[in-house]
Image: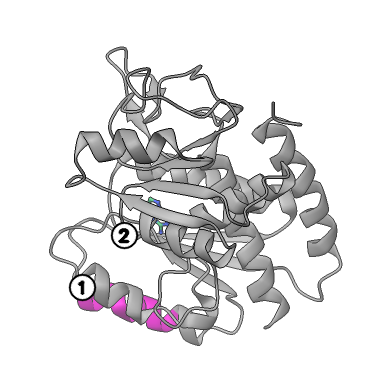
Amino acid sequence: MPSMTIKEFVAKEKEQLSAEVAALPHIPHLVIIQANDSPASDAYVRGKIKDCDEVGARATLCLLPPTTEEDYLLGKIAEYNEDEDVDGIIVQLPLPSHISEAKVKLAVDPKKDVDGFHPLTSFVPCTPKGIVDYLTEEGFPFVGKNAVVLGRSEIVGKPMAKLLLSKHCNVTVLHSRTTEEDKAFYIAHADLIVVAIGRLGFLDARFKYKPSAVIVDVGINRNEEGKLRGDAVAGLPVALQTPVPGGVGLLTRLALVKNLIIAAKSR
Ligand code: GUN
């Protein structure tokens, strides 16, 4: 059983972060560049701005139309890279298809890359960082534990696997080409399952789980009623399962604020 809900954990951490921000010589400043008109991105961005407000940091939204030219976007990033009043820069994904995500990720100054997307970044990507911080608070004993990561995306699966390896877990990454038989085998032996594949209710009662297992649900899907649901059905027979909504999304946003504060401290 979790010692506290994710909402409680985030509220407690934010109190601490507010105190840290108040003690800084300047107000941490995050710039969010959004060049899409996706309602999901609008919601994420609103959440990130709210989090900054709550801890006393500043957030500036640079909202560009989806027709924005790649060069214009790269120019904006260069401007914010140069701006000494800006500590952190994130470019909200997804980008319109005519803009190269790889070029954009490389354009952000690694010292301001609070999303942790640049290959030379010193920041841990937000979703994996948020998850590990929460599991640490819950006392999850990473060393030598069997961790299964479902999904191999650049934003979650790959950095999650790398971070769990650095915590000394035995890490197995499963993906769309893994057979059902192998998925069942690895899931049955897992102490930690991080699922990030974007398939409504993929983890369900057809799999066997260790009763002591922890399931971290990164999925964000809409069910038939349009309600937000994860990649796992609720109430699986494990020791801890993170909810959707009210789960990993909050942890990701918390980790972003932490990265911003680290960036501000090194200004
Ligand atoms: N879109 C979905 N998740 C993320 C994220 O963590 N960072 C950015 N920049 N865009 C996203």
Q: In percent of the image, x 41 and y 24: which residue is there?
A: 208
Camera-nearest residue between 96 and 128: 128
User: What residue does disc 2 label?
Assistant: 64
Q: Which mark is residue 267?
A: none
Near mark 1 (Cα within 10 A), the count class, few <14, some 14-19 or many ≥20, is some
| Relative side of 46 to 212, left or right | left
Q: Tell me the SS state at disc 1.
A: helix
Q: Residue furthest left?
A: 98
Which numbered disc flags the more N-terminal residue, 1 or 2? 2
- The spot of residue 200 in percent (x, y) is 30, 26
Q: Is residue 85 above or below residue 184?
A: below
Give the percent coordinates (x, y) of residue 111: 54, 82
Please report contact status of discs 1 and 2: CB closer than 8 Å, yes or no. no
Residue at 46% across, 65% down: 162
Secondary structure state at the residue bearing disc 2: loop
Q: Residue 158 appears in which quarter of the rendering? A: bottom left
Residue type, numbered disc 1? Glu
Q: Which residue is mark 1?
A: 70
Give the magenta-colored segment's residue range: 70-79
Q: For the C terminus, give its image quadrant.
A: bottom right
Say left or right for 228 vs 94.
right
Ligand 1's quadrant is bottom left
Mark 1–mark 2 distance (CA, rounded to whole Å): 11 Å
Query: Would residue 75 be counted in the magenta stretch?
Result: yes
